[in-house]
Amino acid sequence: MKNLLLCLLCACSFLSYAQIKSPADFLGYQVGTRVTPHWKILDYYDHIAEQVPNQVKSEAYGTSVEGRPMRVYYVSSPSNISKLEDIRNNNLRLAHAVEGTGQTNIPAIIWMSNNVHGNETSSAEASMMTLYELVNPANTKAKAWLDKSLIIIDPCLNPDGTERYANFHNGVVGKNYNPDLYAREHREPWPGGRYNHYYFDLNRDWAWQTQAESTQRAVIYNKWLPHIHVDFHEQGINAPYYFPPAAEPFHEVITPWQREFQTTIGKHNANYFDSKGWLYFTKERFDLFYPSYGDTYPLYSGSIGMTYEKAGNGSAGLGVYMDDRDTLTLVDRAIQHHASGLNVVDVVSTHAEKVVQEFKKFGDDAVAGKLSSYHTYVLKYDQARDGRIRALLNLLDKNKINYYSSTGSVKGLDYFSKKEQSHSLTVNDVVIPGNQAKAALIRVLFEPEAKLTDSVTYDITAWSLPYVYGIPAIASHTKASNLKPYQLAKISNESSTGFGYAIKWDGFSAAQLTAALLKNKVSLKSSEQSFKIGNEEFPKGSILIMKNANQTVKLDQLLKENADRLQVKVHNLSSGIVEGGKDLGSSDVKTLKAPKIMMFAGDGLRATNVGEVWHYFDEQLDYPIALVNPLDFSRVKWDEIDVVVLANGTHPFLKDKEQAARFASWLSAGGKVIALESAVGQLASQEWSALKPLKQDSVAKSKASPLLKYSDRERESLKEYTAGAIYKVTFDSSHPLMFGVKDYFTLKQDANLYQYFEAGKGWNVGYINEGAKMSGFVGNNLAKKLKNGLVFGEQKVGQGSVIYLTDNVLFRNFWENGKVIMANAVFLTAD
């Protein structure tokens, strides 16, 4: 009887495996001979999960902005799959992410991420081949691998961009692909498939989680905290293949083991590539510093995070000629990514015990404070920064960073003064200990100045959160004590029977509430002067709402619902008379208009910067903005437009005589322009503009030596370069553009500064003085120039105005303190 039962089980198992289709059999074509749409990739994964449910499980973790499903798939031995939750919970105990003692007798957890850039299609294609080989009964190595490892595969981190690229390419490619780079199949239309719905680069959003895809992915990622994370990408068509070890600079918090095992994995992959005669490079270009990448964010959470890059991207298509006239094909691209994926599983499963032990050591060292440079970070609370504190706490929650309240005093480095100071803790000060599971990530996000081992970096070099949020803070070498749960009082507003309401203009949440009320046709006023009601001080820009002016709307209901949702305190007004300011009937108390806003979006403009503005209005401010194709300038009903946002990029209408004149006429008649980054320079070239680039005559110029080494050319260029450094902005707090801002720090990513306006020509709102650099790398020559120049200004043109924002106040939409500046530009600056 036992033999019969065994035979039946074997027969059932054989029949199950016989129904497993390879990607080619399921799709009807060889992987790489077509671009596979996102939905079809998931269909194949679901097919495998249905056929071998004891080895593959799927889990939905969210949907993209456009509503496409996002899933991960767990692949391992039947024994491991049957106890997934036990493995997960035990792993979190190893990381000290939950209470309890974890055991190291678990499989190594390998997470593979694909297609974070939607037009880098080879990784999602390759992942189908990898999935098949892991459960293919003919693969004799796979069983041993899966006994020792649990593989988590995310087939596509960016479904919307992936589908955008697939729809484009499949719609233009012929029966046979054309390998000439000028053929249309290699020329994606703007904005391309790289980005998500809002044109964000999701590979820069791991820590900030401004996008829906990133937020949902972080939840499931932090539920697992894998030991290995592989992020598959593509680079230019003439590059070969890149894999670890990574390039310098490594952030100094990255442990010797993480460095060492990156090298072990890289050497293993190199041996395989050598056997195939495939070219590759390591230790170049792709560094490990900026915290919001798919390799660094996992590293700072205890994983071995790695980037793999194959030649390709949106210009590659199914096949394209490289410079040497050899043909790069999607088939070959997919094969090499597939090989790398299996090689990772091979080498990690071989070292599984060590991998798990070192992951545990990372967690042990984190809670022991061994990964910290400062042991405690304190965010100093004051009521005027309540909204900023709440926004930062939300980011900490997303990243599973613990924070507390405490008593006593703390001494340490004050971020704003750069001096040692003592501070007596209040109940609402936020205390963030450095000895917790996320110690490494805390160090990277909060360090006042991260140490750069190499100035050649792939991204910005400064992002310390107290500067980003404009919150005074102290970094202390003393460990925190007397820690208690932190809780800000929940705001619940009450309706009033009095004269009206007042809202303090002290941060972005007040702007969000203003936008919500304006959309609902609530009549609002704003005071250009600070004032006092009882014991409450109201800063410049504060919003006033009169009941008599809002009898046609359900004011009390609208105000309470939106203010409670946004956690904004609403104050009751019993009279139109105020203390210490202008009464509510004064001409300095101005009625706010609900402006109609538009922005050009299309060819010539930087898609990510357009996306920052679009996402800001659509998802954060929640206020309508019309996006207009630049070619449709003449179709715009200009008499209906109040505000035009000019994003970073090229605006051809400014070089067209007739269109530029039409634009100037609209502006002079009362229009408002908000110009960002390079758009500032284009407006400065218009005859009506009084803005001029900063003269550098005062900078001493030494004669450059002609005896420069060719090998030093890259580093020589860095003397005039910054990838992104933080500077303190001195500003006119009486100007409406800076209402609600207590301290502001800008991210300088270029050399652009402008001369101060002469008296009567414009308002010098924000500027950089000498010695304003706070954090980050700036080349020696450029550092001498970045001083005594304008970064924010306003110019009146006829009845209209132009707001000049030379730096990006919405950088990747995590630059929190810039959000209120943009709201001021929209709602408060027009007379």
Image (cartoon, rainbow, N blue to C red):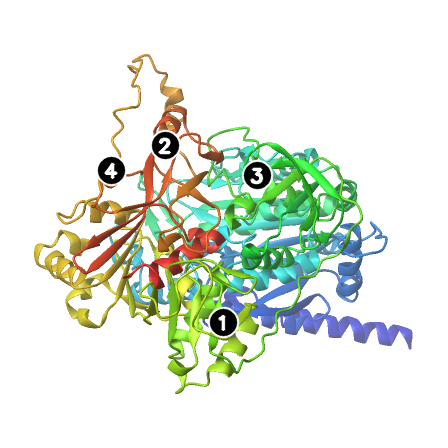
Which amino acid, by three-letter code, is at mark 1? Arg
Among the two numbered marks 2 and 1 on one chain, the one whose residue lies closer to the N terminus = 1
Left or right of 299? Residue 685 is left
Q: Quadrant of residue 651?
A: bottom left
Q: Secondary structure at mark 4?
A: loop
- Residue type for callout 3: Tyr
List x then y, in percent, for residue 632.
Answer: 19, 66
For mark 3, does the 10 Å Cα neighbourhood hold few (<14), some (14 to 19), or many (20 or more) residues?
many
Q: Which residue bears the numbered disc 4?
A: 693
| Mark 2 Cα-neighbour bin, 10 Å: few <14, some 14–19, many ≥20 | some
Question: What separation in Å lies between label 2 and label 1 (alpha carbons)?
Answer: 48 Å
Label 2 is placed on what type of residue? Lys
Mark 2 or 4 closer to N-term? 4
Q: Is residue 598 left or right of residue 770?
A: left
Of the pair 631 and 817, the residue shown nearer to us: 817
Q: Which residue lies most toward the left here?
A: 658
219 with respect to 763 (left or right): right
Give the CA separation, mark 1 to mark 4: 46 Å
Whichever of labels 1 and 4 marks the residue nearer the N terminus, that label is: 1
The residue beneath circle 2 is 787
**In this view of the protein, can residue 200 be seen by the observer?**
no
Q: Earlier in the sequence, mark 3 or mark 2?
A: 3
